[in-house]
Image (cartoon, rainbow, N blue to C red):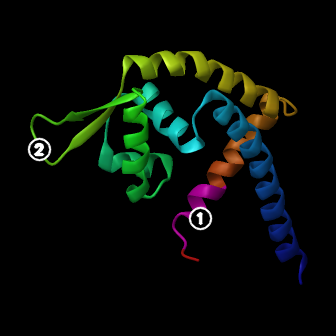
Amino acid sequence: MNEDIKQSLKLFIVLSRAHKAISEQTNQFFQASGVNPTEFAVLELLYHKGKQPLQKIGGKILLASGSITYVIDKLEKRGYINRVNCPSDRRVTYAEISEQGKEFMAQVFPEHEKKLHELTNVLSNEEKEQAIELMKKLGLSIKDLSY
């Protein structure tokens, strides 16, 4: 195996392990807060971006559209979100964060930010910026390729 291929494999392994480590920590935090990672992602989207068409949520949080209905149902039953019909197009239904959902996120999101900061604080701001730019470059180059 040539060195270029070895280096690519090593990068994949390091990225995977870093992602796993951060995901495990954040997932523990979400579960301690009473939600799963997908529910948190939906709440975070609605909290920061406002109401969203149900059909678009999956693509924005990288989840299969079939699973979104289940997640939305669970969040709605808990009082965290509301479904809102589009007045101009009956085929479109929006998910909107409720007051209870806003209160939940106002309490939990700052803790989540703090936890992420603690997890990534081993890197300087400059290193974080470099990592962000490199991961963007990698991600954007891959989206046009097929495996």
Name the residue nearer the viewer: 104 or 5.
Answer: 104
Mark 1: few/some/many CA within 10 Å (<14, 14-19, 20+): few
The N terminus is located in which quarter?
bottom right
Please tell me which residue is depicted at 16% across the width and 36% down the height of the picture.
86
State which mark lies toward you, 2 or 1: 2
Identify whether 125 is placed above or below 56.
above
Q: Total of numbered circles in the picture?
A: 2
Choose between 11 and 49: the one closer to the eye. 49
Q: Which residue is mark 2?
A: 90
What's under tag 1, amino acid-wise?
Ile
Please tell me which residue is depicted at 64% across the width and 34% down the height of the picture.
Answer: 30
Horizontal side of residue 99 vs 31, given as left or right: left
Nearer-N-terminus badge (2/1): 2
What residue range appears in magenta?
A: 138-145
- In three-dimensional space, the C-alpha distance between marks 2 and 1, rounded to whole angstroms, equals 37 Å
Helix, strand, or loop for circle 1?
helix
Q: Which residue is mark 1?
A: 142
